[in-house]
Image (spheres, rainbow, N blue to C red):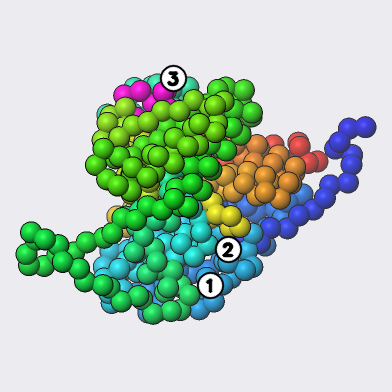
Amino acid sequence: MNDEHLPRPMATYRLAVLPGDGTGREVMREALRILSVFDENSPASFDINEIPCGGQYYLETGEEWPKGSFEYCRDESDAILLGAIGWPDARLPNGDMAGGQTILGLRSGLELYANVRPVKLYAGVTHKVHGVHKQVWNPDLVDIIMIRENTEGLYHSLLRRMEQRALGKKDEPIVIEEFPGLDGEVAWDPRPISRDGSERVIRFAFDYAKHRQRKTGASQSVTCVDKSNVTRGCQLFRKIFREFAERNPDIAVKEAYIDAFTMWLVRNPEDLDVVVLPNMFGDIATDLASVLQGGMGMSASANMGPKHMLFEPVHGSSPKHAGKNVVNPIAMIQSVQMMFEALAFRKKDQNLDTCAEILQSAIQKHFEEGGIVTYDLGGTASTSEVGQAIAMRCESMLKERFP
Ligand code: IPM
Ligand code: MN
């Protein structure tokens, strides 16, 4: 019997939707359009709770998001979708970014320790190494999974302050230390890197490489990027990386210092499969890497923790483009795709996995077949036109798969 005639189990997923600031709100509209197509045409359904938040919301209301929002994300959602956070001049009284509670408070408070940022160039998309859309690369050259540590390192103090705020607690008092040889006003951020924090993200990277190896049949490497010639935190990070390398003889390993890595990344992206980096290096290197895949409008991410997951485009709220319906919604839509994949994996939902495949192939075919694109990819289409085009492709594929 054909499996299409078997009864289809229905699963409902509770989603916390956080559009945030600026263009985050515009790309989130397209994510919701895609979700409604899957909700109507597949066995999966989505129970959506949209929560206003961010720097703009703070300027309007004096709060970063409504009370109880952190608890809702923690206790009552299966996954969180975030647009973008950050708005010029939206600052908390202590100088921290307003809205940070949403993105950084959740990363810290829900232990979203692995920030997974795929860097993949689709056929039909041109990279932006020269800032213009001239040179076409073989897409096989760029297919990297960058995994950024997401809960410590140089972000540690800010993450903890934001978590305190999200939990409604007072910020920890700042301890003043002396810095020998420095006079006058000094500001600093400690950069703690722990064994536990490093082990969990490095384990995640090796598991990811093994998963990819099984799924694609192509052998995978994990590259450790650090600055262990200079910093102690990175020395610990690399020591732990080597422990995992020894325990995983089936996975090839590479090591690089972040400075040389940036050059290597642009020059020979084909050398890289899975890459694991401490927090701030991962923040910087993934913006750089996005030029290999057509720019920030193309880079999606998953923030994964032991129990929770949050999906967001890597780009920010781009105030100068906000309100114009011109930015590329693909990074957001691809983040929805990552959410389908991760939820399907964790909840063992075969139907949702099929949805993930359908959305992936809709995105891929859209570019392969020369579908409309926004200005950043050399086109003139609007945010909503691109969202609509992808949604329509999904709809027809879904009707065929789930008649
Ligand atoms: C990112 C962003 C954030 C970060 C900002 C908005 C706090 O740049 O997700 O990469 O620095 O992590
Ligand atoms: Mn960033």
Q: Residues within 10 Å of mark 1 (few under 14, many from 20)?
A: many
* Coordinates of residue 116 in the picture (x, y in percent): 49, 44
Q: Nearer the viewer, residue 377 or 313?
A: 313
Residue 392 visible, this angle: no
- Gap in Å between the C-alphas at discs 2 and 1? 9 Å
* Coordinates of residue 287 in the picture (x, y in percent): 34, 42
Magenta part of the chain: 265-272
Residue 12 visible, this angle: yes
Contact, mark 3 vs mark 1 (Cβ under 8 Å): no
Label 3: state its secondary structure. loop
- Gap in Å between the C-alphas at discs 2 and 3? 38 Å
Is residue 275 toward the left or the right of residue 43 in the image?
Answer: left
- Disc 2 marks a residue whose amino acid type is Ala
Please tell me whether residue 208 is drawn above or below residue 267 in the rendered image: below
Contact, mark 2 vs mark 1 (Cβ under 8 Å): yes
| First of labels 2, 1 by sequence position | 2
User: Mark 1 highlights which residue?
Assistant: 69
Q: Which mark is residue 318?
A: none
* Coordinates of residue 324 in the picture (x, y in percent): 38, 54
Main SS of residues in magenta: helix
Is residue 17 rendered magenta in the image? Answer: no
Label 2: state its secondary structure. strand
User: Mark 3 highlights which residue?
Assistant: 138
Residue under the point 30% across and 47% down: 232
- Gap in Å between the C-alphas at discs 3 and 1? 44 Å
